[in-house]
Image (cartoon, grey):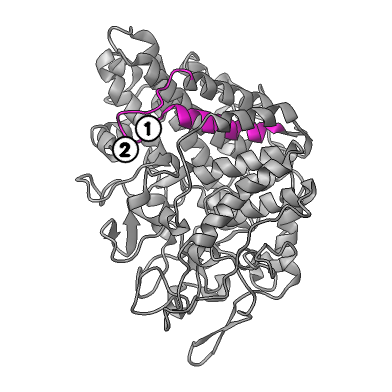
Amino acid sequence: MKYSKIFLSVACAALMTSCSDFLENTPQGTLNDGVMNSPQSIDLLVNSAYASLYGFLEGYHPNTLPTNNWSYGEVRSDNAYKGGGGTGDVYDIHLMETFDNTAETGNLDQKWFLLYCSVSRCNSALRVLNEVSEEEVPNKEIRIAEMKVLRAHFYFELSRMYNKIPYQDEYLPTTEYINVPNDEFTRDQHLSRIAADLLAAAEVLPAKQGDRGRINRDIALAYAAKVKLYQAYEQDPATNKVVNINKSLLNEVVSLIDRVQGYGLLPDFQDLDRVESDNGIESVFDVQYSVNDGSSDAGRVNWSMQLCQPTGPVYGGDCFFLPSQDLINAYQTDANGLPVFDYQSRPDYASISEDATTHALSVNNTTPTVDPRLDFVVGRPGITWKSWTECPYGYDWARDPGVYGYNGTKRFILDRNDPNITFVGCHGLSKLNWHLIRYADLLLWKAEALIELGRQDEARPLINQIRERAMNSRYVKDFNDPSKDAANYKIGLYPAAGWTQEYARQALRTETRLEKAMEGERYYDLVRWGVAKEVMNRYFDAERDNRNYYQNTTFKDGREYFAIPVAQYNFSYGRYTQNPGYPQF
C-alpha cells in the first residue's frame, strides 16, 4: 500500500505535533512524549515520522520548501531558473539562484526548522521504541531500523545543505538541544555516523516489507552507498575544497551497490513520469503520493510541484522551475551521438525569437543533433507536449518569457487528462511518486566510484546501459507530422577506444547531468566533485546574454553550503558558528 494509506490514520496527529514539542516546551493538547509513551502509540509515532517525507509540516508549505529539492538542488545549479512572475516572485529562491542568499534568508531558516522537526519525529518514535519489549511490539527492531534510516535521510539533507549542523539523537534530552553546538562534529564525522546508522539498519530490515512504501534492506544499503560516495570526496573544512578522494570508501560504495539486487531500468525513459511505473523495477526508494483519497485538499498529492506547471491553455500554472538554456545546449551530440563537452562554445541550440507584433515564435539553430532525453525533460515551443493534441507547447505556456525565456519543465508533470492528476484552482497536482533513489542512480554511483578507482573500463558498460535505454525509448514526434521525430535525435554508446580515466570522468559527470536533470541533485553533485565554483561561474558567463539578472552574479569562495540561519544562531544563544564564505555572526 502507498504512504497515503498509512497517512490517513495519522494525518491530524502528524500536523498537530508541533516541532516546539521537541525543541522548546511541552504545549497542552499535543502528541508529546508523555502522552505517546505507550506501546499502542508506536504506529502513530512511526507513521508521523514517515509523514515528514511528504513535507507538509508545522504549517509550512512544500511548494516553496520543496522536498524534491527543485529550488535547493536545481535552481542553484546550471540546470534551472527560478521562473514564476519575475525575480521578485518568491524572492528568497531568486537569492539562491544568484547566490545572494544570506544568514537572514527566511526560506533557509524555515527549511532548517522543518528538517529538524523531521529528525525530532524520528527521535520521538525511537524513544518510545527503546522503552518497549519485543513481546509488546514484535517488530520493534524493524521499526527502530526504519526510523534510523529516515533520520539518516533528514540528517544527510541537513549535512549537504548546511554543513555545520548540530547532532541530536533520541538519547539527548530535549531540554539540552539548545546547548548543542553546530561545530562539534566535522562533515566527515556526520557522514560517517549517518552511514553507520544505515548499515546497522540494513542488518535488521527485511528484504521486502508487507506495506508498500516502508523502508527495506535495499533502501538502507543503497542510501549508505550514496552517503559513502559523498564522504569519499574529502573537503578542507576551512574552504570546502575537495582535497582527497578516499579510495577505501569508493570500494565500499561498489560493494554496497552490488548487494542491491533485483532492480533494472524501465524500458522507456518517459515511463519515469507515469504513475503506472511507480514502485516498479527502477524504484529503489520512492516518496509515495496519492490523489482524491478522502483526505483534505485533493489528497496526499505532490505539493512540491504545485508551482511548477506551465501557464497557459493546458495547465494554467505558475511556471516556476524552468530548464536553463545551458541545460538545453548540453543535450547536443556529435556525429557519433556522443555528448559535446564543449557545447558552451557553440551557439544556443533552439534559441527563441518573438515577433513583437504577432507574438509568433521562431525557433533557431535546430539542425544540430541532440540526445532524445532533451524533449523528455524540457517543454519547448513548437514541440509536442506529451499526448496533448490540441496544440504544441507555445508562446502562451510561458508566464514571464521576458525574464526567463519560453522553455518549461516537462518532468514530473502528468498529461492534462491523466486520471491521476487533479486540479486545485489552477494547479494540476498528481500522485506521481518522487524517486529519492532509482536504479539509474546505482549505475551512475557505481560507475563514478569505479572511474575514480582507475577501473574505468568496468564503468563504461554501466553508463552505456543508461544511454541505451534513452536510445531505445520512444522519441517525441513532430506535432504536425507524427511520422517524423520532433528534432534531429541521435544518441550513441561510448566506445572502448579513447576511454581514459579523464575522458571517462567527463563522460560520467555529463551522463549524470543528462539522465538526472531536474531531479534535485545537480548542485550537490557539483559540490561533491569539488567543481561548483568553476562550473557555476562558467555557466553565469554563458548565460548573461540570456538572463539579464545574472549580470553581476558570481560564485564566491566558500559558498558551497548555505549560511547558518541567524534565527538558529539566536536559538543557540550564540553557540553556532557560521560556514566559510559568509560573514561571521
- Secondary structure of residue under mark 2: helix
- Residue carrying label 2: 3
- Observer-nearest of 416 and 452: 452
Give residue 5's quadrant in the image: top left
Q: Which mark is residue 50?
A: 1
User: Does any portion of residue 563 appear in the rendered image?
Assistant: no
Total labels: the figure holds 2
Image coords of residue 537 (percent x, y): 74, 58
Q: Residue at x 63, y 53 (%)?
A: 511
Q: Is residue 139 above or below residue 543?
A: above
- Secondary structure of residue under mark 1: helix
- Observer-nearest of 470 and 346: 470
The residue stretch that appears in magenta? 203-232
Magenta highlight on residue 208:
yes
Image coords of residue 333 (percent x, y): 66, 67
The crowd level at tag 2 (other Cα within 10 Å; few <14, some 14-19, many 20+) is many
Q: Is residue 58 above or below residue 303?
A: above
Image coords of residue 44 (percent x, y): 29, 25
Asked if the residue under mark 2 is in contact with the one under mark 1, i.e. CB atoms within 8 Å, the reply is yes
User: Does any portion of residue 463 appear in the rendered image?
Assistant: yes
For the C terminus, the quadrant is top right
> Amino acid under label 2?
Tyr
Image coords of residue 504 (percent x, y): 73, 49
Q: Is residue 13 left or right of residue 277?
A: left
Callout in the foreground (1, 2) = 2
Q: Residue at x 38, y 47 (%)?
A: 433
